[in-house]
Image (cartoon, rainbow, N blue to C red):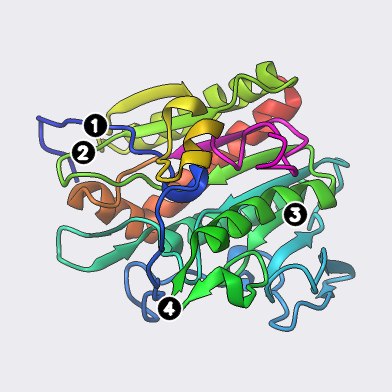
Amino acid sequence: MRRRDVVVFVACGACALALGGVLIGVGTAGSPGSPSAPRSAAASGSAASDPDGEAEAAGSDVVRAIDPELFSPGACMEYPPTQGDRDQSVFLDAGHGGLDPGGVGSTEAGATVRESTVNLAIELDVMGILRARGYTVVVSRTQDTTVTRLTPSDVDGSLLTVQGVFNDVTARDVCANMAGANVLVGIYMNSGEPWNAGCLTGYDQDRPFSAGNRRLATLLQDDVLGAMNAQGWNIPGDGVQPDTGLGSALTAAAEAYGHLLLLGPAKAGYFETPSQMPGALIEPLFVTDPFEASIAASAHGQQVIASALAKAIEQYFTGS
C-alpha cells in the first residue's frame, strides 16, 4: 500500500488525556477474525490474564495483578521476563478501553476501527517482545476494559462521566507508580478529519526528568515513523511535541491544568498522583484516515509499530 500524495495532518491529541469531553461513548471490541479484533495476552507471547485479577503462572514465573481491588479485572498486570532478567520494568498503556473506545474510524474497505482495540493489540505485541528481551512489563490493561474499577459516579448509562474519564486516565499513572516502573509509554492513535494523517509523539517538558521524557519521545518517534515508512507507507511525521499542545480540554479545570494527565505534573486540588518516571505518548496513525486506519487495523501494521516501539524502549535503556 502507498498513501495518496496530498495530506494534511493535525495533532488532535489523545482525547480524554487532558480530560476533554463530558461523556465518552461505548466501545465495542471487533469480532474475532475482524481486522480490529485484539490478540489475547497469550497470543502475544505472554501468559493470559486472569479475568478475576488474580496472579497466575507464566511458566515457572508469576504474573501479578498489582491491586485487584483498585483496578478492573485484567488491568494493571505485571509480567516477568520470559528470557533473562535485565532488572528493568516498562509500563505500557493501551489508551482508552471499555466504555471509552477512543477515536473511531474505518478502513479503506469500510471496516470499523476502534482506537482502543488497536492500542491493546499493539501493547500486547510490545509486551511479548520486551519480555523475551529480559524486561519486566506492566500493562495498563489486557482486555477491552477500563483500567480503574468503576464506581456509580464514573458512569452515566453506557457512558463515562467526566469524573470517570479522569479516574480511568489517572489510574494508569497510579498503576505505573505502584509497579515501580522505570519508564512509561502511552500507546494511542490520533483522530480528526478524514484527510488528517501522520505520526507524532508527546512528552512533558515541565517534569524533573524532562530530558529523559524528550529523549524517549524522540526515540519512539524516529523508530516508529522510520519503521512504518520502510514499508513504503509514506506516513507524514508531525514530530516530537510538548504535551501542552496536545489533547482536548472541555472543562475549565482541565484547561487550567494544560497537560496530558498521563504525562503531566501534579497540581494541588486537581491532580495528586502523577507518574514518577520518564514517559512519552505516541500516536503513530490517524484511525479516521482510511489509509492509516487500514494499517492500524492489520496484524502486520500492528507488529511493525510494536517492533519499533520495543526497539526504541531498549535503546532508551541501553543508550544506543
- Residue shown at the point (77%, 60%) measured from the top left: 79
Observer-nearest of 230 and 9: 9
User: Mark 4 or mark 3, which is nearer the start of the sequence?
Assistant: 4
User: Mark 2 or mark 3, which is nearer the start of the sequence?
Assistant: 3
Residue 319 location, quadrant: top right
At mark 2, the secondary structure is loop
Residue 60 location, quadrant: bottom right
At mark 3, the secondary structure is helix
Mark 1 and mark 3: Cα distance apart in space: 32 Å
Mark 2 nearby-residue class (10 Å; few <14, some 14–19, many ≥20): many
User: Mark 1 or mark 4, which is nearer the start of the sequence?
Assistant: 1
Q: Which residue is mark 2?
A: 196
The amino acid beneath tag 2 is: Asn
- Residue shown at the point (49%, 26%) measured from the top left: 244
The amino acid beneath tag 3 is: Cys
The amino acid beneath tag 4 is: Ser
Q: Which residue is mark 3?
A: 175
Q: Position of residue 44 (x, y in %)?
A: 59, 64
Is residue 264 highlighted in magenta? Answer: yes
Contact (Cβ within 8 Å) of mark 1 with mark 2: yes
Mark 4 and mark 1: Cα distance apart in space: 32 Å
User: Mark 2 or mark 1, which is nearer the start of the sequence?
Assistant: 1
The amino acid beneath tag 1 is: Phe
Mark 1 nearby-residue class (10 Å; few <14, some 14–19, many ≥20): many
In the image, which residues are magenta? 258-283
